[in-house]
Amino acid sequence: MNFDPCTYVIFGATGNLSRTKLMPALYHLDVANRLPVGTCIVAIGRRPWDQEKWLSEVREMVMAKTKDDFDESIFKRFCARLVYHQGDIVKPECYSELAALLNNKNKFSHNIAFYLSISPADFGLVMEMLSNNQLFNEDLGWRRVIIEKPFGYDLDSAQALQKRISHYLTEEQIYRIDHYLGKGMVQNVLVFRFANVMLEPLWNRNYIDHIQITHSEEIGIDSRGDYYNGAGAMRDMLQSHLLQLLTLVTMEPPASMEAESLRDEKVKVLKSIRPIPKEAVHGYAFRAQYASGHVQGEKVSGYLQEANIPSNSVTETYASMKLYIDNWRWRGVPMYMRTGKRMAKAQSTISICFRHPPLQFFRDTHVQCMNQNWILLGIQPEECIRIEMTVKEPGLEMKTRTTSLDASFRNDDEKAIDAYEDLLLDVLKGDRSLFLRFDEVEYAWRIVDPILQTWAIERDFIATYPAGSWGPEDSRLFEKSAHFWRSSLTPECK
Ligand code: BG6
């Protein structure tokens, strides 16, 4: 498919996201010949760099992510697309100069995508300034704005932000990014569910016992102390990425893959989630903070010893919760979610546990108990779809064991594509299906707000877990004593 060229304008271009994700992703799109001729990338940064310095910085960013694949001739072509625009985003001249630059018809396409990789506190201001300088005017080409999370801090602030930005932009122009939706395995959840007919009859409360979503990280908060301490794991991961994963696993089949159909179904799930009353928060959610410990054999400090963290912080670096979706398909099926920094292993998985089969059939045999069937969806680093089944052990006796059917997503010789490559290309195509509509964000805040409000006033105590462990003891969340966190993608006996 051919698309019109566009100009990407990246605010916060010298920051971490741009270095590690955006610039490498744009380079990879160029390598794959997916950037139309005439597509340019204007980087806005405060640092007093000239064009030459910017190109050398970008070289470093790209090389750090390409390793052996770096191609000098393609990089040269990529460099021809790059422009550094020095400016301070709080100053009006940054925008008037930008407008003058972009109005140079011969160099830049009039389709412009503004990527706001900046503090959310500046979203409103930047949009107002862009609007004042007629940069959202679509007379000559489309104008789109990509906003990174967090979209607001809670329900009220998200609504206030939405109100402010809707003065300047229509919903069609806003691309709220949740980079999890750009991950190949996350998109594969939809294909797995809706392209395999044998799953649909099983995908409901009659056969599924419970669902778990885990995102664990080995890393701590690095240099993000200022942001993280104000956010915590619930806002940083659960309200956004993990709830999105939950909607994909549990939604009804959408009428099509088209943006509005998909988003309608996701919103229906979020709306059906049983609200957690404030007085019951402790039965539904758990928070904890990492203490010092060992990760991959190395001693690491606790959260309170990290840079820019106040010594009395009760910000959670681990959060878990249980939800119920009160609709026909899922009523009564617990949905467990957890996420944490500095845990034993970095991985994201969706684990679906089926009900026990009746055991009468095996009476008078050696089969005492059988493992339940699980479907395991490894999102990262291992990308896999695995169905665990019970089979007879070879031999003269009737004994069983668990084996798994594998439907690998990617062969070893097939390259992994970073989520941002997919999403940046979608902006260019005008495909919003993998971006969030405001009501999705709004309903997600409604779900977690009571928890956040309760935690905000309980400032005396927070549980801890040793860095490098699987997190705190939070089994009080489980509906049944037989439930447990599933951490492994290979058969576990319990
Ligand atoms: C980001 C969070 O949105 O997602 C980070 O702010 C987190 O704290 C990251 O580490 C995880 O993303 P990924 O793609 O590395 O799993």
Image: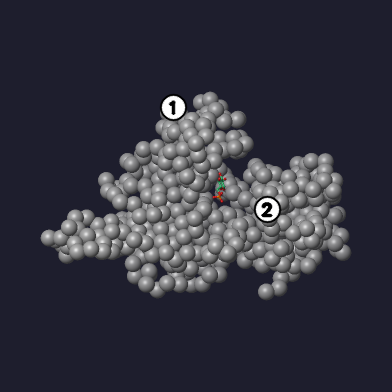
In the rendered image, residue 169, in percent from the top left (x then y), is placed at 67, 57
Disc 1 crowd, CA 10 A, few/some/many (<14, 14-19, 20+) = few
Name the residue carrying label 2: 67
Whole-angstrom CA distance, mark 2 to mark 1, is: 47 Å
Q: Earlier in the sequence, mark 2 or mark 1?
A: 2
Q: Tell me the residue at 69%/65% (across/down).
A: 32
Name the residue carrying label 1: 460
In the drawing, does residue 342 fall left or right of residue 148?
Answer: left
In the rendered image, residue 186, in percent from the top left (x then y), is placed at 51, 60
Q: Nearer the viewer, mark 2 or mark 1?
A: 2
In the rendered image, residue 102, in percent from the top left (x then y), is placed at 82, 57
In the drawing, does residue 119 fall left or right of residue 460?
Answer: right
Q: Tell me the residue at 38%/69% (across/down).
A: 199
In the drawing, does residue 25 fall left or right of residue 87?
Answer: left
Front-most of residues 282 and 37: 37
Q: Tell me the residue at 17%/65% (across/down).
A: 361
Residue type at the position of mark 2: Lys
* SS of the residue under disc 1: loop
Mark identifier at residue 376: none
In the rendered image, residue 355, in percent from the top left (x then y), is placed at 28, 59
Q: Quadrant of the N terminus?
A: bottom right
Vertically, is 142 above or below 240? below
* SS of the residue under disc 2: helix
Q: Tell me the residue at 44%/33% (across/down).
A: 466
